[in-house]
Every structure is written in structure tokens, then in C-alpha cells.
Amino acid sequence: MAETTTADPTSPADVERVLGLRSVSMTYPTPSGPVGAVRDVTVDIPARGLTVLAGPSGSGKSTLLRVLALLDRPTSGRVLFGDRDLGGLDAGRLRRLRRSRIALVYQNPAENLFDYLTVGENLRAAAQLAHRADPGEGLLDQLGLPGTGGWRVRALSGGQQQRLALACTLAMGCEVVLADEPTSQLDARSADLVLDSLRRVTALDVPVIVASHDERLRSGADTLVWLRDGELITVEGGRR
């Protein structure tokens, strides 16, 4: 039976979906009993532009991002990739889908890269993992890292490492990029350059989803998903 989708007034109107959540909740066990990190969230993430998951600490941003990245299964509810309901996929099939089509850039730049390799070797390694051709150094030029192909990753600043991580997601041919607080460990100038790189990724028709406290990212977003205490408050979209 074909899935019937009910319009959600908190979702951007008339926008193709890359990822969607339907009544998603996430509960974690603790010594004092289960704690709900996310409760009954239904939202569509547009298949273009920059979407920012926003809200105060403890609002559920990072939890929701991990569910969207297919790293964690929700306690209840459904996750959609385009029009495909992923609920029936086993762990192996989810892992293959995630590796081939979805990329997550972590908060700590060092977690995203092989620091013992050069910049160019990291790009080639990312492409090889996805069984893709060597992308060359054009991606480095596009993301503001010209001439760094022979540099060791250790020689890069934190902001440069985050931009290299974004280049690696493009080298892998991922269809959607997610990032968890990508500017939180950066100074203002480096954060601005990372935001510019996120914009360059979306200009290549690759949607980007970010969980962030950063006002710069919120003000540059095409879609804002506001959370508080694990609940969806509102979605602001269509601003560009």
C-alpha cells in the first residue's frame, strides 16, 4: 500500500523532502529511570539548502541529528529517506545506506579526518571508501583550501580541518551532509569560513543539516527547526 502523507503545518510547504521524521521519540535509560531526549517529533527536512536544528542546551538537537544521520534508531516513530520508510531495514542495510549516501561531520575536527595523512590523501581515502574516482584538488579550491593538498592534516587550523571534512563528504558523493556543532570550537573568523563552506556545499545541490547554538548559522539558514525540552516548537522556512 502506498504511504499517505499528511501535510504538517510546521514543515516547509511545497519543498521536496530529503529526510523526514514521523512521531519520533528517543528515550535513554538512566539509573533513576528512562529519560526522554526527544518526544513525538514530526518534521520534513528540505532536499535543498541549509537546515539548522536550533534550541538551548538539552533541547534534543544532537539527539535528533543522530537519528537523522541513521546512527541511532528512535525508540518509537518512523524515519524517512525521501519517500522510503527505513523502519524495515536491518542494521547492516542501514549502515550501507549511511556510508553511501549520508555523511556526518563531528564537532571535534580531529574526529573527521586521518591526521597522519596529507590533505590530498584524506580526499582520496574518502573517495576510495565510496568506490569513487580520485576527485583531484578542485574540491579544495571550492571550499577555500587551495594549494593545501600536500599539507599534513596536523598543520591545518580547526576551521580548515572542518572545511576539509566537508570536502571529503563531497568526494564520497554523499547526498546529504549533517554536522554537529561544526563551529563550536572555532574562533569567529574560522566559523565564518566554515559557514561559507557549508553554503558552497548547498550550492552544489547537496542539502546540509546542522545542529548548532551559533547565531551565525541560524541567521544563514534556509530552514530553522526550533526545539525545546525535546519537543518541536516550530519550523521557519523558505527565507531564501
Image (cartoon, grey):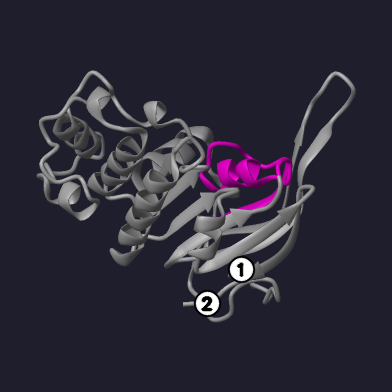
Under tag 2, what secondary structure? loop
Viewer-closest of 128 and 239: 239
- 239 to the left or right of 97: right
Q: Position of residue 61 (x, y in %)?
A: 64, 46
Q: Up-down: is 128 above or below 228?
A: above
Q: Position of residue 226 (x, y in %)?
A: 68, 59
* Residue at 36% from the left image edge and 33% from the top image edge: 158
Mark 1 is surrounded, within 10 Å at the Cα level, by few (under 14), some (14 to 19) or many (20 or more) other residues, namely few
Under tag 1, what secondary structure? loop
* Residue at 26% from the left image edge and 45% from the top image edge: 167
* Residue at 20% from the left image edge and 37% from the top image edge: 123
* Residue topped by disc 1: 3
Q: Up-down: is 193 above or below 238?
A: above
Name the mark on residue 239: 2
> Is residue 70 visible to the viewer in this orientation of the structure?
yes
Camera-near label (1 vs 2) is: 2
- 157 to the left or right of 209: left
Q: Which residues are magenta?
A: 57-82
